[in-house]
Image (spheres, helix red, strand yellow):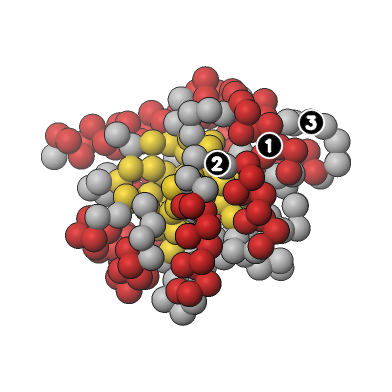
Amino acid sequence: MLRLGVNIDHVATLRQARRTYEPDPVTAAAIAKLGGADVITVHLREDRRHIQDRDLRLLRQTVPYGLNLELSCAEEILDIAIEVCPDQATLVPERREEVTTEGGLDVVSDPDRIAQVVHRLQGAGIAVSLFIDPDEAQVRQAAALGVEAVELHTGAYALATGREAERELKRLLSAAAVCRDVGLHLHAGHGLTYDNVAPVARIPMMRELNIGHSIVSRAVFVGLQEAVAQMKHAMETALLQREMS
Ligand code: PXP
């Protein structure tokens, strides 16, 4: 089964633009579920630019089926994660000046720090996924850290066109093959849209796609439930094509 994780950070971005109470990401999660979301994903950033602590706590109470928290290795956020206990924690790099998460987590350069964080999260009963670039060394190091899953960064694929997009897709396919060899669950995300999602959904053993900006953008015009349903449909169509080929 291929799960759709709907990232609702940008619903909170809109609210924070006026520091008001609407639109509420907690309501967004309920509507996304009606549209077919399998997982609700949020990133509690150190600067709290979108999701707030209150959102995360309420989401834990109202999303019993699959809450995925993206977080950096910062001690303060880690403590909150352990207290709130999401179903899954996805470790991401975080820099204050970035517009969004830019590269993958470099698990090869700093394995000791990441090992400590993984240990604390798993000790609290939280499944851990590492958001990494589609690179064999990163995947093998992630497996050595004993995590449940990796999320392959699809940002470079999403930005590329023509031949370059084909090359980026090949990188994703090769990294996915290594994931299978080492027994890691395979997730992907970042920059995925209705137009570019199909080849990624068709990658063998792909289990979860985390998608935010494109869905929330479409929701402005067609409503959130419909926008989620359209993305789910795009993924299911791609899967059917994979099975028939
Ligand atoms: N996965 C991870 C780890 C991310 O950091 C983000 C962005 O918050 C996403 C997926 C979703 O990316 P997008 O909003 O471009 O769909």
The x and y percentages for residue 167 are 30, 66
What distance separates the C-alpha of mark 1 from that of mark 2?
10 Å
Give the residue number, with chain letter if any, for mark 2: 86
Q: Residues within 10 Å of mark 3 (few under 14, many from 20)?
A: few
Give the residue number, with chain letter if any, for mark 1: 57
Residue positioned 27% across, 58% down in the render? 179
Location of the C terminus (image quadrant)? top left
Label 3 residue SS: loop
The x and y percentages for residue 163 are 32, 65
> Image check: 239 left or right of 107?
left
Name the image quarter holding residue 99: bottom right
Which residue is most to the bottom?
A: 109
Up-down relation of residue 115 to residue 50 (above or below): below
Residue positioned 23% across, 32% down in the render? 240
Residue positioned 22% across, 36% down in the render? 241
Q: Which mark is residue 129?
A: none
What distance separates the C-alpha of mark 3 from that of mark 1?
17 Å
Q: Earlier in the sequence, mark 3 or mark 1?
A: 3
Label 2 residue SS: loop
Up-down relation of residue 63 to residue 143 (above or below): above
Asked if residue 124 can be seen in this view, the reply is yes
Give the residue number, with chain letter if any, for mark 3: 22
Which residue type carries mark 3? Glu
Name the image quarter holding residue 158: bottom left
